[in-house]
Amino acid sequence: MPRLIAISNRVQVETEGENANRGGLAVALAAALRSSNGLWFGWSGEQTEEFTGQITFRREGGVATATIDLEAQDVDEYYNGFANRTLWPLFHYRLDLTEIARDFAGGYARVNERFAETLGPLLEPDDLIWVHDYHLMPLGARLRMRGFDNRIGFFLHIPWPPSSLLMSLPNHRDLVESLLAYDVIGFQSDEWRQAFIDYVTAQFDAEMDGEYACHKGRRTRLLDCPIGLDAADFGSAVHSLAAKQAETRLVVSAVGRDMIVGVDRLDYSKGLQERFAAYELLLTKRPELREKIALLQIAPPSRGDVPSYQQIRADLSALSGSINGEFASIDWVPIRYVNQGYSRDELFGIYRASKVGLVTPLRDGMNLVAKEYVAAQDPADPGVLVLSCFAGAAAQLKEAVIVNPHSAEDIADGIARALAMPLAERQERHKAMLECITRQDVNWWSQTFMEALAEVPGPDSRPQLIEAGGGKA
Ligand code: ADQ
């Protein structure tokens, strides 16, 4: 079995214990890395005065990790800059928040080169290399330029934008062409995959041969491969002590009211302002629901160094304060707005205690919270998922109450419908969604991707190629 080398911006190996926050990605990659005796490579999250390429090797939870430190300028230009101020907003259709700066693009190219330079000496010819997410799009091409002929795949965790938006990026052609140096590219849904196909066929005259994009003699397989949860882990999370305690705490504090829950990173893509506005509309239009429901919004701050994230934090505090000021009574707070994170187990208890799971991103690659909410429900008396039509998860969770996250009326109607839904309908919808989540779980996801990568012809049997991102492979 070939060794797997996983590469992502940050390396997040699962941690043990009931308060651990084990992300599905960490669990899936850790399992695949352990069984192939692989390595997880990425940025340590630490800064250094001068980049030396020094690698710190560790073994955490049975997984070998290798991390590098970056300079402050790298962090500013690559991470806070091109990744989070250019690509993230652009790929989430927020051209209004997209900042175009040559320094950012330069820092992005430099850090990807630094990754290639430090990773290169660790690679062996048979290694399967799996690169993750928008921070590292050019890494495959950088490795090819250094002569690496390994099977290299890339998975995009976020949406792929329509060509008309992408073309506002000055170096869009180079960026996309560098992606075609990968052997396999995985997308969260067919919509993002199709948007990528639209670009490469129109801009490069690439030809599609089944799932393969063919360009300059190279073949790149484009895979619709939605990420999932760790199905084997649902049960233990729901029945853990931390989950039970969180569930009881929420049920007791709700004093018979129906809880509606939202759990998101504090990010403008998650549609939080629109969600609060919809909730306000619901309380305005349906006074009979006042005092009978409450919204718990858990949203820990993220990317606090980026100005647009500071702004959304201020906006949401003001909005929740004004809704509470308008509607609260001496013993009822309409919105509980909480800026802290919770462990995975606690979240499962919170989901289970809530009648409605409100997941209304304006755009989202997948949205694992939607799946977690479904997984946490009691099948005998499940809550209802209200889900944005613009989350990748909507392509799989068709039995959710699907809403347009830009329409306050639509969200408000969706919540009201969910609150009034009869038990039999709730059970039926939940059953279908749980079946999908269990079948296409995170192990299915990583296996599907790795199998596609392993099927790529080996270095000896494929054509010697290309000019990717300006260099000869
Ligand atoms: P994110 O944008 O971070 O990820 P999401 O999938 O919703 O979004 O959440 C990832 C994990 O973070 C979930 O397991 C969730 O429980 C946890 N989380 C979110 N909010 C939390 C909170 N308030 N407290 C504690 N934990 C919280 C990106 C893409 C998504 C894609 C994932 C995985 O933007 O579209 O689903 O990667 O591919």
Image: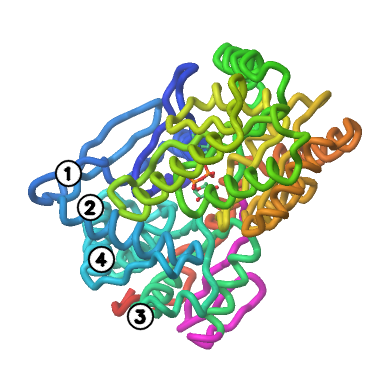
Secondary structure under the numbered disc 4 in the rendered image: helix
- Residue under the image location 68 percent in, 16 percent down: 255
Camera-near label (4 vs 3) is: 4
Q: Nearer the viewer, residue 227 or 351?
A: 351
Q: Which residues are magenta?
A: 202-226
**Residue type, numbered disc 4:** Phe
Q: Nearer the viewer, residue 48 or 132?
A: 48
Where is residue 166? Give x, y as percent. 46, 75
Marks 4 and 3, Cα distance to the nearest angstrom?
Answer: 24 Å
Where is residue 374? Give x, y as percent. 70, 35
Magenta stretch encompasses residue 139: no
Where is residue 244? Give x, y as percent. 62, 14
**Residue type, numbered disc 2:** Val
Secondary structure under the numbered disc 3 in the rendered image: strand
- Residue under the image location 71 percent in, 37 percent down: 438
Kindly check if marks 1 and 3 are in contact, taking CB atoms under 8 A apart as contact.
Answer: no
Between disc 1 and disc 3, whose residue precedes? Answer: 1
300 to the left or right of 263: left
Marks 2 and 4, Cα distance to the nearest angstrom?
Answer: 10 Å
* Residue 467, label in figure: 3
Residue marked by disc 4: 104
Between disc 1 and disc 4, whose residue precedes? Answer: 1
Vertical position of residue 334 compared to residue 239: above or below: below
Residue marked by disc 2: 75
How many numbered dots are placed on residues in this image?
Answer: 4
**Residue type, numbered disc 3:** Glu
- Residue under the image location 56 percent in, 46 percent down: 446
Kindly check if marks 1 and 2 are in contact, taking CB atoms under 8 A apart as contact.
Answer: yes
Question: How was this image coloured?
Answer: rainbow
Residue 465 visible (yes or no)? no
Marks 1 and 2, Cα distance to the nearest angstrom?
Answer: 8 Å
